[in-house]
Each structure stands twice: as C-alpha cells, then as structure tokens.
Image: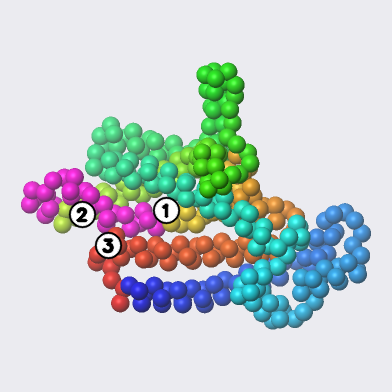
C-alpha cells in the first residue's frame, strides 16, 4: 500500500506538469494581448509605454519557454505572481477564499452523505414499497430543484418563521468568521448553503447508492449468507454495503472536488466570498494571471481527490490489492 501511494505521488508530477503545460499555452492562444485587453477594457486610451510596462511586469516580453519556466518555478518558490485586478499576491487572494470554500465543501459533503447513504440503503432494501417510492420522489425532487433556488427559499423561510415567532426577521450572517474564533457564528452562516447544495448532491448519491445496493444484493455471496442464517442487518452492513460503496465514493469525491470552486451561484445567493466568486470576478476583470492559477488549483484538487479515492478502494473492497 505504501509503495503504491508513493508511486502515485510521483505519478502526480507528470500529470500536473502536463496540465500546467496545457493551461499555459491555451491561455496564450486566446486572441489579443492580455495587457492591451485589460487596459482597453477600462475605456481609456491605452498608452503603448504602459502596455510595455505591463508586459514586462508579467514577463510577456520574454520567449514562451522562459515564461513557462518562470510559471513552473513559481510553484517551487511559492511565488504565484501578482493579480492584475487587485494588485495583491495571488497566493494571498486564493488563501483568503480557500478556507471558506474548503469548509463549505466539507460541510456540503457531510450533509450529502448523511442523507444519501441511509436513504439509498433503505430504498434498495425496501424495493418497490411505499418507502422506496418516497425516497425516489425525494431524490428526483433534489435533482430537479436548483440549489440556488432552494437557498433563496431557505432565506425567505428563515425570515418568515423568525418574524412570526420572534417578531424580528433573521438572516444568516454575511461576514465570514473562522470556526476557531466563533464556532456558532460560523455554523449559522455556512449550514444553510451546505444544506441547500448538499440536498442537490445527496439526490444524485442516493440514486447511485440504491442502484449499487440492488446490484450487490443480487450477488451469489449475499444469497449464500442468507442461506447460512445470518442476520439481515449484518448482511447489509458487513457484506453488501462496502462493495456497493465503490461507485458512490467515486461520485462523492468528484462532487467534493467540484464543490471547492464550483459553487458560484450559491455563493452569490448567500453572499459568500469563496473561490467560485473569485473565479468569476477574475474572468470579468480580465485578470490573466489569477485565472491561470485558479485553473491550476482546480487541477491539483481533482488530482489529489483521485489519489484519496484510489486509496479508499482498498479499504472498502478487500479484493483490491496494490502490488
């Protein structure tokens, strides 16, 4: 196992290098010069000398191979460049939002798992009963309802309920507070976007759990376990669930990686300044350097998530061995 993990860690290097190569050259295949586009977008006269200074600051006046070497070297020195939009170090800009997006992704995943696993198992065990139909209706509704719309309904519901009970409307806090400073304030702010988004992803995971459990419950070893007189609860938990979790874990991991930078609309609804909003702002402000580093961050998150999933496979299914 340890040899496999070390090998996969080393294999991440060429993967990330290939992704960096692709991102670097695709960004430079876009029509127009980043400095000219940036300055012309303000509606002001673009001074050639100012454009030349901007190109020199970004290193765009150097050969492409030298630019790529500086782009890669920045990851070893911790220098990711300076944002063209805020004029702050990119590492600082990402660091401000990453902790919020990571916490929201973790809470959303916990909500999704807490809903999906028990509902998916119950739906499979009680197939074609009223419980199964209720769970399937619940999951289909989750897929059909946009998470941002559900978020708006949650905010309105909180306002109406608190106005009726307390005489004063209440909304989730706007300013982000670290969970280490104010755990309750942090929880009251992020639990509602986590519920709104987690319900959407739990619906997909519930259907996947149900399908995987139905497939496993029809296997020969499950029939053998029942023929031996094992308790049904033991058969479900020990023999069926772990084998059925493989596709579910893959789905949840992919969703988790997407959640860190993909909750653009939900962040707008709840006024959260996360990575998704930063991504949109960087594109809207023609921030060439920041967009480039955000894409690489998303690549790194997906690669690291795939590594964690591969390691979990061996724990979930004893038949998987890494030689």
Taking the image as drawn, is residue 200 in sight?
Answer: no
Label 2 SS: helix
Q: Residues within 10 Å of mark 2 (few under 14, many from 20)?
A: some
Along the line of sight, the residue nearer the viewer: 19 or 83: 83
Percent position of residue 44, x then y = 90, 56
> What is the x, y in percent for residue 298?
56, 61
Residue, disc 3: 317
As helix, strand or loop, the secondary structure at mark 1 comes to: helix
Say if 79 sits above or below 266 in the image: below
Q: Which residues are magenta?
A: 223-252
Residue beneath the point at 33% across and 48% down: 209
Q: Disc 3 versus disc 2: distance between alpha carbons?
A: 10 Å
The residue wearing badge 2 is 239
Helix or strand or loop: what does disc 3 sit on?
loop
The residue carrying mark 1 is 252
Cα gap from disc 2 to disc 1, whole angstroms: 21 Å
């Amino acid at each position: 196992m340890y040899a496999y993990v070390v090998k996969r860690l080393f294999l991440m290097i060429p993967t990330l290098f290939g992704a960096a190569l692709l991102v670097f050259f695709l960004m430079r295949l876009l029509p127009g010069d980043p400095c000219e586009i940036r300055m012309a977008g303000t509606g002001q006269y673009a001074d050639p000398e100012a454009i030349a200074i901007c190109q020199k600051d970004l290193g765009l006046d150097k050969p492409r191979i030298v630019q790529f070497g500086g782009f890669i070297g920045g990851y070893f020195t911790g220098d990711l460049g300076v944002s063209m939009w805020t004029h702050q170090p990119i590492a600082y800009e990402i660091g401000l939002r990453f902790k919020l997006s990571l916490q929201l992704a973790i809470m959303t995943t916990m909500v999704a798992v807490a809903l999906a696993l028990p509902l998916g198992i119950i739906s499979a065990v009680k197939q074609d009963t009223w419980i199964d139909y209720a769970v399937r209706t619940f999951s289909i509704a989750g897929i059909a309802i946009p998470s941002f719309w559900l978020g708006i309904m949650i905010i309105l519901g909180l306002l109406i309920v608190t106005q009726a009970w307390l005489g004063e409307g209440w909304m989730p806090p706007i300013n982000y507070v670290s969970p280490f400073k104010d755990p309750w304030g942090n929880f009251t702010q992020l639990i509602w976007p986590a519920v709104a988004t987690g319900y959407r992803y739990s619906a997909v995971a519930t259907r996947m759990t149900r399908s995987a459990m139905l497939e496993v419950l029809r296997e020969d070893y499950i029939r053998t376990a029942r023929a031996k007189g094992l308790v049904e609860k033991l058969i479900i938990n020990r023999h069926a669930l772990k084998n059925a979790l493989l596709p579910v874990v893959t789905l949840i991991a992919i969703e988790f990686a997407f959640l860190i930078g993909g909750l653009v609309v939900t962040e707008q609804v709840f006024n959260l300044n996360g990575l998704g909003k930063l991504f949109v702002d960087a594109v809207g402000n023609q921030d060439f350097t920041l967009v480039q580093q955000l894409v690489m961050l998303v690549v790194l998150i997906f690669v690291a998530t795939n590594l964690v999933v591969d390691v979990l496979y061996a724990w979930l299914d004893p038949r998987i061995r890494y030689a």
